[in-house]
Amino acid sequence: MTDSPAVDPSTSSSVARRTVIAGAAWSVPAIALATSTPAYAQSGSAAPTLTFSQAPASTPACSPTTSPFVAQLSGADNVGKVVQFSLPSGWSWASGNGSYLTDSNGFATVPAGAIAANSVSGTVAATSSSLTASTSVETSSYGSLQTDKSAAALPSNSNAEVVRLYASGAGITVAKRNGDVWSSYKGGSWTQVGTGGDTDVRRLTFVDATNTQAALWIKSGVLQMGSSVAAIPQSSNADFVRVDASGPLALAVRSNGDLWRWDETAGWAKTASGVATGPAQIACFSGATKTACYWIAGGVLYVDGVADTIGSGDNNGVSRVYAAQGYSSEGANLAIVKANGDAWSYTTGNGWRSRDTGASTDLEQAAARVVGRGMGAVWDLKSGVLWNTPNSPTGTNQVSGGFVGPASNTNLLRITAPGLLAQIVTGSGALYTFDGWYWTRKATGVSTGPGQVAAPDTDQWNSPYFWIVPASC
């Protein structure tokens, strides 16, 4: 997709400007990428629509945006039309004035870097004639990477402006605001694997296979494995937007919905089309008795290409899928959250179980966790309160305030649990960690954006926890 040209909106009288009021990004499910308002219905043809087909779920605070915004105009007369983009309060145009023409496919593209975000999350809107569309975008702060294990610390001369970190297995990968990418394995020394990495959410992770321990990340849409370009057909190594890994398995999806799978035996191979491209919509399940890849397409959860069987007609409206891998006889657990707030979990020992209702659907507001013997737990947030679903087919128990340390069980914002370990970040920036037995208040003043805390499973009792302490703009 090529960038559409910017135009001077004063030359067109068809653009209706729209004022956008900034709001908290987590108040709107991130997978609800865009809303559109049709202007009219044409006799004998579908009404034209305007939607966002691509937008970052999150962008670094106080920086140029790292991904493009793409609005798509449908209808018979959708080429060469003016689309006016408007910004949240406090954001500004680094280049241009927000007016772009649609290309031959009806796409109007704001290039990466054309918008300067500030520290406030908000809504970007697009208008063409009387059609409107909007998408919420969260700003993520950047700063120094902190850990509770000094031996695992990032080198001091490189420990600045870290914006994203993800762990899988015993490895962790971090990205700095300038696109530098670093990784570490089993709490060992850090290696800079490259530059120019994409810093949007879920665009880097770590592959921990028998003979391959490497960062998996995206550079200008091109998939990278460690310090090299990933060995997939080069004609297809472009426009990647999300990655996921669980131990020896990895997934990567392109902006057009093509999904690629990796393992050490087969390497990279295309496995599906039409897959959702939002964050937490692909996941790998790597257990002792089962390995599989899951993805969402059209609200339906697929496992290795087949629509899964969840309850009785419950495989619809699926918004998020989360996987955990860690210390147990099975070694894996899976959780999904539907758009209506229903939460389900899967383990090989128990299959699918209905776990909760009313769960928050935003990114990192639910998590699967490995607890042993083929059993699985799902934690989810409801209006900032943590709920714990026990190992029983039905029922939920609200977690008491003491369960997350001295703070009350309110104002919780993020929860991650890629394995046995878990981390919670409150809206005020307090970090709580869970080692399989106890919750501990680990730090305060922590960054609250998605992908800003991580815990690789290097050792059940001595694994390091990582978090970002934000710098001021």
Image (spheres, grey):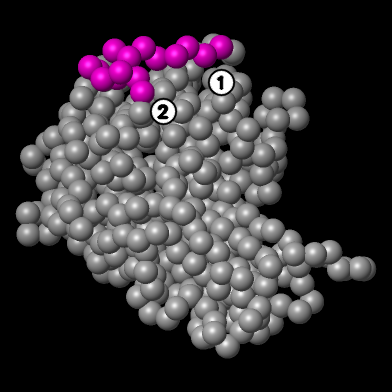
> Residue 68 versus residue 298: which sits nearer the camera?
68
Of all residues shown, which one is farthest toward the bottom? 11
Q: Quadrant of the C terminus?
A: bottom left
In the image, residue 30 above or below residue 396? below
How far from the left and from the top, in percent, is residue 191? 18, 58
Closer to the observer: label 1 or label 2?
Answer: 2
Residue numbers of the magenta segment: 395-410
Q: Which of the 4 image quarters holds residue 337?
A: top right
> Residue 428 versus residue 248: which sits nearer the camera?
428
What amino acid is at disc 2? Gly
Q: Which mark is residue 384?
A: 2
92 on left or right of 251: left
What amino acid is at disc 1? Arg
366 on left or right of 437: right
- Residue corresponding to mark 1: 355
> Residue 238 versus residue 169: which sits nearer the camera?
238
Residue shown at the point (53%, 56%) measured from the top left: 135
Residue shown at the point (80%, 64%) measured from the top left: 40
452 on left or right of 19: left
Answer with mark 1 or mark 2, whichever residue precedes in sequence. Answer: 1
Q: Quadrant of the N terminus?
A: bottom right
